[in-house]
Image (spheres, rainbow, N blue to C red):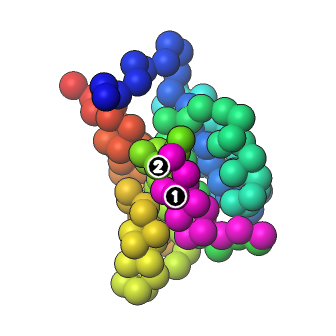
Amino acid sequence: VPPPAPAAGPRKVLVVEDSVTSRLLLKHILEGAGYAVDTAVDGLDAQSRLRTGRYDVVVSDVEMPNMDGLALTASIRATPATAELPVILVTSLQTPEQREAGLRAGADAYFTKGSFDQDRLLATVRRVAGMEAS
């Protein structure tokens, strides 16, 4: 089965983050790079948005109320319609065990907020969404 053709218009990113400050920062960075961005306040909100919208990438925090980023990632992987959707986790959890848990849940990439680099994030979004700059 060939991959779906890219949609016309900007690529869509779903940012899932319970902190208003971090959510707005990520939205600003991604919109500045030309992405259309929707936001969700936790994993349950994100699940609802994923059922009704089409996204090219999910950028999610790990520690959130109701449904955390690991459970959200596992849910995305377990749902046929979103199983191939790239997920990037951005979190303050930085131990190797926490990173391993994120990747084990199915995340395509894992960033820590302490060493956050917006250029690396944007390069990773382009890479996992199959939009390598030529």
For mark 1, what is the residue?
78
**Residue 20 appears at what percent x and percent y?**
76, 56
Viewer-nearest residue: 95 or 45: 45
Q: Is residue 32 left or right of residue 101?
A: right
| On-image quarter of the C terminus | top left
Secondary structure at badge 2 equals loop
- Residue found at x 48% / y 56%: 77
For mark 2, what is the residue?
83
- Residue found at x 50% / y 27%: 11
- Whether residue 73 appears in magenta in the rendering, the answer is yes
Viewer-nearest residue: 126 or 87: 87
User: Looking at the image, is 27 positioned above or below residue 62?
Assistant: above
Q: Amino acid at mark 1?
A: Ala
Q: Which residues are drawn in magenta?
A: 66-80
- Whether residue 29 appears in magenta in the rendering, the answer is no
Q: Amino acid at mark 2?
A: Ala
Q: Is residue 52 left or right of residue 73?
A: right
Secondary structure at badge 1 equals helix
The part of the image, by quadrant, that contains residue 44 is bottom right
Label 1 crowd bin: few (<14), some (14–19), many (20+), radius 10 Å? few
Secondary structure that dominates the magenta span: helix
Which of disc 2 and disc 1 is earlier in sequence? 1
The mark found on residue 114 in the picture is none
**Residue 50 appears at what percent x and percent y?**
65, 42
Residue contact between numbered discs 1 and 2, judged by CB atoms under 8 Å:
yes
**Residue 12 appears at what percent x and percent y?**
56, 31
Q: How many marks on residues?
A: 2
